[in-house]
Every structure is written in C-alpha cells, then in structure tokens.
Amino acid sequence: MNFGTPQEMIDEERYFLESCKPKILAWFSCEITSAVACKLAIEEHGKQNVELVYIKIDSAHPDNDRFIKDCENWYGKKITIIQSDKFKDQFEVIKKQKYVNGVNGAPCTLHLKKNVRYKHEKQTDFNNQIFGFEFVKKEINRAIRFAEQYPHTKPLYPLIDAKLTKEMCADIILKNGIKLPTMYELGFHNNNCIGCVKGGKGYWNHIRKNFPDTFNKMAKAEREVGATCIKNNYLDELNPKAGIHKPPITPDCGTFCEIEFADIIDERTNEVMTGLKSMMQLQLF
Ligand code: SF4
C-alpha cells in the first residue's frame, strides 16, 4: 500500500483536520462590537472557517465603506456584502408599506435586515453563528433570550466569553490603528441607519442637527403615510429642545431579530455576569 511521501501525509492530515473544523457565519454590522466579535471568531476558528457577512442598507453612513475596508485589512479576509433585493433603505419601506413603526415592530427591520439574514442563512452551510452581544447585563440577557428563541442559529458570543464591553471594543479597534465609524464620533451610541424609525425625541433632534436633510426627508415621509416615528409627535412639530441626552439615546437594531422578553432579566444572566458559568455552560441550544 502506498501512503505517499511524508510531506504528502502531513498535508493530508492537515487537510483532514481543517475539514473537521466548524463552519462559522459571523455577522459584521459596522458596529464596533460586531467588528471585534468577528476578529475573535477568526482567531478562534481560523479565517478559512469563518464567513464574515454585512447587510448593507443605503441609508447607513458612507464612512461605513471605509470602516469595512479597514476591518478587512485587519482580518486579512473579505467581508461578504448582501442587501435586500426589494428595498434599499427605510424610506422605501415606509413609502411602499405605508407604515413606520408600531407594536409589531418596525417593518424596515424585517425587510432590510431579518429577511436578508434568513435568506443568507438558508443558503449557507454553517455550524454556528457569531453575534456581537457585549459583556453587560442587558446584553447577556438578550443573548440568552436570542439563543432560546433562535436555537437553529447555534449562536456563539465571543465578547461575552471574553468579558468585553463596547468601550473595550472601541479601545481594541483604536489600538489596531482603525478610526471608529463616524456615527460614534458624532455622538451616536450605535451605528444604525441614519434616521432610524425607532429613535426617540433626543435622537431625532441629534439627527436634525447633524443630518438636516434626513430629518426633513423623514418628516415628509411621516406626513405622506400619516404615521410617526415618535408616538403621537410628527417630526415637523418636534420641539428642538425635547429629549436632549448626552450622548443621545440611539435605538438598537442589530443584524439579529428583535428579541422577545429582552427587558425581563433572566436569572441566569447573573451567573454569567459573576463568572459562575460561561454562556456555553448554560447549554442554551
Ligand atoms: S436601524 Fe432603524 S431604520 Fe434601520 S432597519 Fe433598523 S429600525 Fe429600521
């Protein structure tokens, strides 16, 4: 029997070991947390085993293109960019659906993010998915709820495992010579679509100051469909001094789905916070 040369046998074993490694789908969202979570996923699983995916929305800040390129250089790997084939931004969703936001959630989240993610998931052979929930109580709770509500994603949470907060992620990115996305530099807490329908009074006044055209565009869209972002308050009637926060409170709308019971703290959250158990030890999926 011919086993080949020693080098061929080593190569074959290496190939076998690589093919046994899990395939990981890592969601990159241009948030600093997801950027670091993707880096940790690559370090842990090897870049050949991780697919990095970004869901593009045209109303994101144009500086995101620069941040994507900087992160690709940092990772040594390209990021797959996918987008809804029906809607390019939240304004198109509002116009076509004649609905802004309400008790059933924002339709733009469904059409611009969730459906795009579901489609990519279905086309991808993955063992686990990576999400950038950070190491704070509220986010650990969301991560637990998410794993229970979407067990098929087999989610991994590298930031929680490494006890990294958003501030620590900002530090890691800056130390690697990457400028933070412009939305953070403008004082927004998240890097969402510019003009997020889930924003409150302070958020929208901050948008009015930094992106007056977007503010006016949303104010016009609200009147056209007869619905508002802020409950019972059309943007063209919004008091310019209302709800000013420092920094402005910005809504969450990550790549992941809206999570039910996200505000009700699961008792296991404390076990992770105090280091009693890891997320894996909770056996959520
Ligand atoms: S970030 Fe805001 S505007 Fe954009 S999809 Fe999510 S909810 Fe809609």
Image: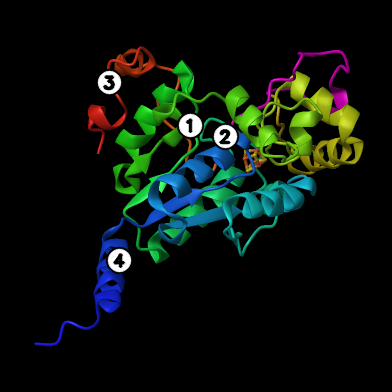
Q: CA distance from mark 1 to mark 2?
A: 7 Å
The C terminus sits in image quarter: top left
Q: In the image, is residue 234 part of the stretch drawn in magenta?
A: yes
Q: How is the image coloured?
A: rainbow
Label 1 Cα crowd, 10 Å radius (few <14 / some 14-19 / many 20+): many
The secondary element bearing badge 1 is classed as loop
* Label 2 beta carbon less than 8 Å to ligand 1: no
Which one is nearer the viewer's eye here, 131 or 76? 76
Location of residue 12 (image quadrant): bottom left
Judging by the rendered image, the residue that carries numbered circle 2 is 33
Task: Say which of marks 4 and 1 sits in front.
Answer: 4
Left or right: 89 as drawn, with respect to 147: right
Amino acid, disc 4: Arg
Q: Which mark is residue 133?
A: 1
Q: Earlier in the sequence, mark 4 or mark 1?
A: 4
**Above or below, 80 relative to 145:** below
